[in-house]
Image: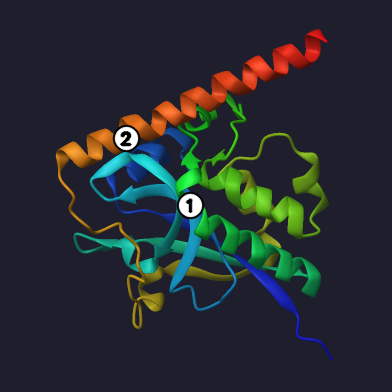
């Protein structure tokens, strides 16, 4: 009998100022999402900042769970195991491997993040927020009809939809015992100029792709 495959989805209450701000706006305990192929959750995949000191320079990230212990605080987390077919599991694995090997081409969707309070997704080529990315993976590789039908889905709504698949909720400390950074650049200190340059470059690419997408759409509708 074939082994049942799962996509593991994590919701996190991050111990940083940006996370506290987001939770104050949404009035919901979780502000971040990620996806893993392993229930051990020593690392997972998401879209977020690359370095702790550069909150507006982000993209595709392979995040160590060590990110979520800071200044004596440990994040709370909720993990959901979503069953998928062997074929979809392998396709999801290929997608994550592709994103990891081409991570420089993908940027964090700051425009969509700013429009979140208005329940608007801003579609930009090769760009996601953490929720957009995880939900795109679930829409493509799992069989949860409500996710395929909704145009906008907040972290709170995703958390409610995935409640039947919950396997853990509590402190991330349980997953920190054998943790490693696994190449995660988050704790590295690179200097103010580096962070500033990368932030402007990354968000410049985001703006360019957004405008280009709008112009291409306009040209397409005018044909």
Kindly identify the residue that appears in the image at 60 percent across and 43 percent down. 132
Image side of residue 15 versus residue 88, left or right: left
Q: Residue furthest bottom?
A: 1
Q: Classify mark 1: residues with Cα within 10 Å, few (<14), some (14-19) or many (20+).
A: some
Q: Where the N terminus falls, by quadrant?
A: bottom right
Count of labels in the image: 2
Q: Is 43 located above or below residue 134 in the figure?
A: below
**The image quarter in which residue 213 lies:** top right
Where residue 113 appears, x then y in whole percent?
A: 48, 33
Q: Quadrant of the C terminus?
A: top right
The image shows residue 106 at horizontal and vertical percentages of 50, 44
In the depicted view, which residue is nearer to us: 19 or 186?
186
Residue 195 placement (x, y as % from top left): 24, 40
Is residue 123 shown to the viewer in this render? yes
Mark seen at residue 199: 2
| Marks 2 and 1, how far apart at CA | 16 Å
Indicate which disc, 2 or 1, sits on the residue closer to the N terminus. Answer: 1
Q: Which mark is residue 103?
A: 1
Question: Which colour style is shown?
Answer: rainbow
């Amino acid at each position: 009998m074939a082994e049942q495959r799962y996509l593991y989805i994590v919701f996190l209450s991050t111990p940083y100022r940006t996370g506290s701000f987001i939770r104050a706006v949404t009035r919901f305990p979780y502000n971040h999402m990620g996806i893993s192929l392993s229930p051990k959750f020593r690392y997972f995949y998401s879209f977020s900042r690359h370095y702790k000191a550069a909150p507006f320079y982000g993209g595709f990230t392979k995040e160590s769970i060590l990110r979520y212990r800071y200044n004596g605080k440990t994040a709370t987390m909720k993990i959901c195991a979503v069953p998928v077919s062997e074929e979809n599991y392998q396709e999801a694995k290929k997608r994550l491997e592709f994103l990891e090997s081409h991570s420089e081409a993908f940027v964090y969707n700051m425009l969509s993040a700013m429009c979140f309070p208005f329940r608007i997704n801003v579609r930009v080529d090769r760009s996601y927020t953490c929720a957009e990315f995880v939900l795109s993976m679930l829409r493509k590789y799992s069989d949860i009809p409500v996710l395929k039908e909704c145009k906008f889905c907040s972290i709170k709504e995703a958390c409610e939809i995935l409640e039947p698949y919950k396997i853990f909720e509590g402190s991330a400390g349980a997953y920190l015992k054998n943790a490693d950074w696994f190449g995660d650049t988050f704790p590295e200190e690179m200097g103010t100029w580096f962070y500033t340059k990368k932030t402007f470059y990354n968000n410049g690419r985001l703006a360019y792709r957004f405008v280009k997408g709008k112009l291409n759409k306009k040209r397409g509708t005018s044909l």
